[in-house]
Image (cartoon, rainbow, N blue to C red):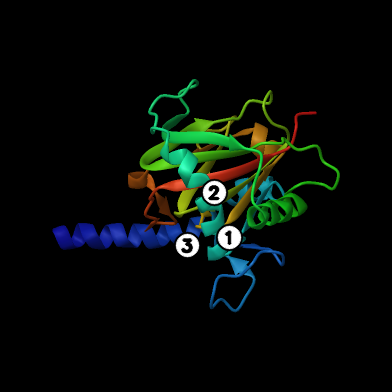
Amino acid sequence: MKLLVKAAKQAQRTYFQRILLYRFTSDNSPLRKGLQSTECQWLCASSQEILTAVRGLVEFRQNFISEAEEKALFKELEPGLRKKRYEFDHWDDAIHGFRETERLQWGDDCESVFRRVREVAFPKGSSLLGPVHVLDLDKAGYIKPHVDSVKFCGSTIAGLSLLSDSIMRLIPENNSAEWLNLLLSRRSLYILRDDARFKYTHAILKDEESFFAGQKVPRHRRISVICRNLPV
């Protein structure tokens, strides 16, 4: 009986992988090592319709920063973060198990990273929020589904993922049965624009919920470094 249940679960998992995993092609996206095509498997969704709806509004760039650049960012951030405690209550109950800060001044190596982020994520001449937002999520931490307040940032956010892979889930506010998962690999850059910011909730899944297309994606401590433009 156990073998039958196991086989049924495996068959179901394979079926959903075929149905739900779609590929976006981006000539601008860096390739994984060893891949011979520009097809990057970083999105899976409940339907083709939701993928069509977010085309152009959700962007992902694998290996946007190098290991050396990740180390440079971490070296600048860790001394300040280490002085803070992880918090398990947030003013709007959106984040659990986190430390956060903002940083305006960066060393040359880090500043060159942010110049690249600004070039690919924001239109030339955009007014950006000066301080960069830094969110340090404990291994046991997570971010609940929420929409960022328009009081604090504009139409675009661009986030670097340090230290760990994770899964971001977007859900349309007008249809909670639909969903979109983004595989945010370590050292990647994600960009959310316009309706993807304001008409979808976004969340970072708990470690025990961290699956992508049926495959477990272990969640460890994760630092996100986020650039935003100013509200209009």
Mark 2 or mark 3, earlier in chain:
3
Q: What residue is rendered at 50% in x and 21% in y?
A: 92
Q: Disc 2 marks which residue?
A: 76
Mark number displayed over residue 184:
none
Q: Secondary structure at mark 3?
A: helix
Nearer mark to the viewer, of 1 and 3: 1
Circles 2 and 3 in contact, beta carbons < 8 Å: no
Q: Secondary structure at mark 1?
A: helix
Nearer mark to the viewer, of 1 and 2: 2
Give above or below for 99 relative to 121: above
Query: Which quadrant would residue 229 be assigned to in this image?
Result: top right
State the quadrant of the N terminus.
bottom left
Mark 1 or mark 3, earlier in chain:
3
Q: Disc 3 marks which residue?
A: 18
Q: Amino acid at mark 2?
A: Glu
Does residue 152 appear in the picture of this structure?
yes
Q: What residue is rendered at 62% in x and 75% in y?
A: 37
Nearer mark to the viewer, of 2 and 3: 2
Q: Is residue 23 left or right of residue 5?
A: right
Q: Is residue 66 left or right of residue 209?
A: right
Crowding around mark 2 (Cα neighbors within 10 Å: few <14, some 14 to 19, many 20+) is: some
Q: Disc 1 marks which residue?
A: 69
The CA distance from mark 1 to mark 2 is 11 Å
Mark 1 or mark 2, earlier in chain:
1
Residue 65 at x, y = what percent? 60, 61
Residue 141 at x, y = what percent? 38, 38
Crowding around mark 3 (Cα neighbors within 10 Å: few <14, some 14 to 19, many 20+) is: few
**Residue sitting nearer the eye, 166 or 4:** 166
